[in-house]
């Protein structure tokens, strides 16, 4: 029961991590190109650099600056650690297509994968509950069989003299017994 849930959780986590890794590599390819372009703009502008360019570069480095940061940002976006629209806004500044790709990633990861994980846990819980109900029913049947055997043994141990040479028990014999 519980071990099956842990095993399913492990595989779902591997799937989620692999999805984040692959998407993270794709994003990193374009972000690194954009960071290189921004660094060149900042170097060429010298002291008259536009502050919004520096801020944008800082945002890119904070959220998407390395593969680990990228995967962390992706995880935060699907788990509620950060508002995913903030992450998407940074990518949309590079290309609107990135916004669409990021929304697709969030949709697939949160709606599909996380719901599958929830479904696995619910199904495992239902299976464990069904096993418990079956155990209770089997235990009740065993107790009833044991009781019937005890009554049969008791009945067989009583002599016919106890019932007045009859194989039935009447009210008078019951009160006397």
Image (cartoon, rainbow, N blue to C red):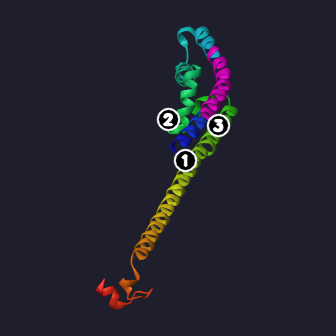
Q: Which residue shows up at 48% across the image and 67% down it?
A: 145
The residue that mark 3 highlights is 105
Foreground of the two, 162 or 67: 162
Q: Position of residue 98 (x, y in %)?
A: 67, 32
**Which mark sits nearer the N-terminus, 1 or 2?**
2
98 up-or-down from 41: above or below: below
Q: CA distance from mark 3 to mark 1?
A: 23 Å
Q: Position of residue 80 (x, y in %)?
A: 50, 39
The residue that mark 1 highlights is 121
Quarter placement of the C terminus: bottom left
Q: Which residue shows up at 53% across the image and 55% down it?
A: 131
Q: Is residue 74 left or right of residue 27?
A: left
**Which image quarter: residue 109?**
top right
Is 23 within the magenta? yes
Foreground of the two, 34 or 123: 123
Q: Position of residue 90 (x, y in %)?
A: 58, 29
Q: Which mark is residue 82?
A: 2
133 up-or-down from 27: above or below: below
Q: Main secondary structure of the magenta part?
A: helix
Label 1 residue SS:
helix
């Amino acid at each position: 029961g519980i071990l099956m849930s842990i095993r399913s959780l492990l595989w779902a986590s591997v799937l989620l991590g692999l999805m984040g890794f692959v998407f993270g590599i794709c994003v990193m390819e374009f972000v690194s190109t954009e960071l290189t372009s921004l660094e060149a703009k900042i170097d060429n502008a010298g002291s008259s650099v536009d502050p919004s360019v520096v801020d944008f570069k800082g945002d890119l480095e904070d959220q998407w600056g390395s593969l680990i940061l990228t995967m962390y940002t992706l995880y935060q976006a699907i788990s509620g650690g950060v508002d995913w629209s903030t992450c998407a806004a940074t990518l949309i500044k590079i290309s609107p297509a990135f916004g669409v790709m990021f929304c697709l990633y969030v949709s697939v990861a949160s709606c599909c994968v996380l719901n599958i994980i929830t479904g696995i846990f619910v199904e495992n819980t239902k299976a464990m509950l069904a096993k418990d109900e079956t155990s209770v029913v089997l235990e009740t049947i065993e107790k009833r069989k044991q009781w019937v055997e005890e009554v049969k043994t008791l009945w067989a141990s009583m002599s016919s003299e106890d019932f007045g040479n009859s194989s039935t028990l009447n009210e008078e014999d019951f009160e006397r017994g």
